[in-house]
Image (tube, helix red, strand yellow):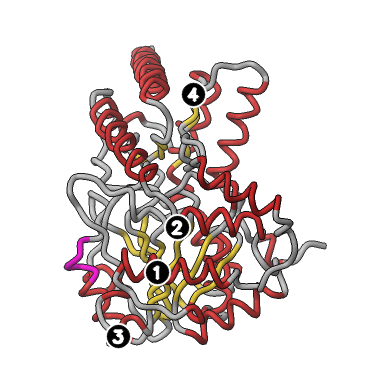
C-alpha cells in the first residue's frame, strides 16, 4: 500500500553502484571504485577540532531551524567576498547537506504541472526531486562537449516554465557554462519570469584558468529570480557532516525554513560549528585538493582516450570524467554491470544521468588507483572486442 509518490522514485544509481562495490571490497575482493563523488581527502584538522570543541562545550542541543546566526553570517560573508552577491542573513538557510537544500528548493518552488528545464546530462537526483514536487522535467540536450547555451534553454521555454536548474561545473560531465551564456540565460529568466536554481557545489573545482560566475551576481533583476545552492561537502571534504546552504529571495527562504521545521528541523549542531570553521578558517586545504584533482583530471582524460572503443571530452571542472562507451556495443548499464562483475571496477552507468552512451568515473581517488582501474578497463574492453569478433566469425 505504498503511495504513488514513492513508487515513482528511482533509487540513486551512484549510491547503488558504490554500495555494491564497497560490499565486494568488504568481502575481500580487490575492487577499484570510480563511483560516488566524494573527495578522498580527510576533513582538515582545524575543522575537526572545532567540532570537538563544540562537543566539549556541550553545544549538542537544538538550534534555530535554518542554522545558527554565526554560520548564516559566515555564508553571507563568503557569498559577498567570493561570489560578489550581497545577501542578508534572512535570505540564507542552512540544511542537512546540499541534497537537502535542493530538495527544499524544489518543494518550495514547484507545483503540480509546472515545468523545470533540466540540462542533460544531469545529476541523478534532480529529476527525482522534480517528480516528487509533482512537476515535469523538461530535458534540454547540451552539445557534444556537454556545453549549455542560452539558445538551447530558450527552445525549451513554455508558459509553464517555472525553473531552470543550472549546475556549473556539472556533475557528471565536468562541463562549465560559459560566462557569456550565463548572462544570456539571466536575460531569458528575467524576460520570461522563471527561477534559476544555481547549484554551485563544485565552484572551487575549476581548471585551466577558467573562473566561476554566480548568476545571482549579475544584476538585481536576476538576483530576485536566482536561488543559489552550495555546501561544505566537496570543498572541505566534509561529505558526511551534512551541511548545505541556500541563498535566495526572502519569501522562498522563509518557505523552505517552514518546510524544514516540519521535516528535519535544524542540521546537526556540531556539524554547524565545524562548517563555521570551514568557511572562516584557513583555505589552504582547498587549494591542495584542487591541485591534486587537476593532475588526476589530465591523467584520466589522456588514458581514457588511449583505450580503443572509448572517447572522452576533457572535463573542465568538478572531479568526474564522462567517457563515451557506445563503440563497445554495450549500453551503459550493461557496461557498468559487467565491468564490476568481470574486472572488479566500479563506474556509474550514464543512463542514470540521461545518457546511455556514457559512464561516469569519479577521479576523487589516487593516481595509483586511477591507473590500476584504467589498466583493468583497457584489458577488459580489449577482451570484449576480441570475443565479439570471434562470435561474428562463427
Q: Earlier in the sequence, mark 4 or mark 2?
A: 4
Q: Earlier in the sequence, mark 4 or mark 3?
A: 4
Determine the secondary structure under disc 1. Answer: helix
Residue position marked by numbered label 4 in the rendering: 32
The structure residue drawn at horizontal position 63% and vertical position 24%, both measured from the top left corner, is: 24
**Percent of width and height locating residue 238:** 53, 47
Viewer-nearest residue: 304 or 92 = 92
Viewer-nearest residue: 335 or 62 = 62
Other residues around mark 3 within 10 Å, as few (<14) / some (14–19) / many (≥20): few
Instruction: Tell which residue pokes out farthest to the right in this image.
Output: 1
Determine the secondary structure under disc 2. Answer: helix
**Percent of width and height locating residue 212:** 26, 59
Whether residue 267 is visible, yes or no, is yes
Q: Is residue 197 magenta?
A: no
Residue position marked by numbered label 2 in the rendering: 279
Whether residue 381 is visible, yes or no, is no
Q: Earlier in the sequence, mark 2 or mark 1?
A: 1
In which quadrant will I find the C terminus?
top left
Of circles 3 and 2, which is in front?
A: 2
Instruction: Please provide the residue range marked out in magenta.
Output: 178-182
In 3D space, how far apart are the residues under numbered discs 4 and 3 (Cα atoms)? 47 Å
Residue position marked by numbered label 1 in the rendering: 77
In 3D space, how far apart are the residues under numbered discs 3 and 2 (Cα atoms)? 26 Å
Q: Is residue 38 above or below residue 246?
A: above
Tally of marks? 4
Amino acid at each position: 500500500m505504498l503511495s504513488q509518490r514513492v513508487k515513482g522514485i528511482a533509487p540513486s544509481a551512484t549510491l547503488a553502484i558504490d554500495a555494491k562495490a564497497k560490499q565486494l571490497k568488504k568481502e575481500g575482493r580487490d575492487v577499484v571504485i570510480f563511483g560516488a563523488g566524494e573527495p578522498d581527502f580527510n576533513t582538515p584538522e582545524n575543522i575537526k577540532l572545532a567540532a570537538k570543541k563544540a562537543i566539549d562545550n556541550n553545544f549538542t542541543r537544538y538550534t534555530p531551524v535554518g542554522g545558527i546566526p554565526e554560520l548564516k553570517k559566515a555564508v553571507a560573508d563568503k557569498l559577498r567576498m567570493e561570489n560578489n552577491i550581497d545577501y542578508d542573513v534572512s535570505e540564507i538557510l542552512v540544511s542537512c547537506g546540499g541534497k537537502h537544500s535542493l530538495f527544499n528548493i524544489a518543494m518550495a518552488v514547484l507545483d503540480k504541472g509546472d515545468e523545470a528545464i533540466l540540462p542533460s546530462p544531469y545529476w541523478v537526483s534532480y529529476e527525482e526531486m522534480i517528480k516528487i514536487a509533482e512537476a515535469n522535467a523538461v530535458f534540454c540536450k547540451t552539445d557534444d562537449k556537454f556545453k549549455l547555451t542560452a539558445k538551447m534553454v530558450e527552445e525549451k521555454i513554455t508558459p509553464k516554465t517555472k525553473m531552470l536548474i543550472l549546475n556549473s561545473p556539472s556533475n557528471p560531465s565536468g562541463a562549465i557554462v560559459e560566462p557569456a551564456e550565463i548572462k544570456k540565460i539571466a536575460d531569458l529568466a528575467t524576460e520570461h519570469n522563471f527561477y534559476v536554481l544555481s547549484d554551485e557545489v563544485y565552484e572551487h573545482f575549476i581548471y585551466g584558468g577558467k573562473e566561476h560566475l554566480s548568476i545571482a551576481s549579475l544584476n538585481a533583476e536576476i538576483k530576485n529570480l536566482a536561488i543559489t545552492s552550495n555546501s561544505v561537502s566537496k570543498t572541505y571534504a566534509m561529505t558526511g557532516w551534512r551541511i548545505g546552504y541556500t541563498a535566495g529571495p526572502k519569501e522562498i527562504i522563509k518557505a523552505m525554513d517552514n518546510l524544514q521545521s516540519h521535516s528535519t528541523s535544524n542540521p546537526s549542531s556540531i556539524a554547524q560549528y565545524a562548517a563555521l570553521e570551514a568557511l572562516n578558517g584557513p583555505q589552504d586545504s582547498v587549494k591542495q585538493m584542487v591541485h591534486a584533482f587537476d593532475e588526476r583530471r589530465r591523467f584520466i582524460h589522456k588514458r581514457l582516450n588511449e583505450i580503443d572503443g572509448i572517447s572522452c571530452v576533457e572535463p573542465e571542472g568538478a572531479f568526474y570524467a564522462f567517457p563515451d562507451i557506445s563503440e563497445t556495443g554495450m549500453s551503459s548499464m550493461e557496461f557498468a554491470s559487467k565491468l564490476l562483475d568481470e574486472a572488479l571496477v566500479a563506474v556509474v552507468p550514464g543512463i542514470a544521468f540521461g545518457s546511455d552512451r556514457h559512464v561516469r568515473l569519479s577521479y576523487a581517488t589516487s593516481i595509483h588507483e586511477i591507473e590500476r582501474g584504467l589498466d583493468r578497463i583497457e584489458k577488459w574492453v580489449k577482451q570484449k572486442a576480441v570475443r565479439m569478433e570471434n562470435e561474428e566469425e562463427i
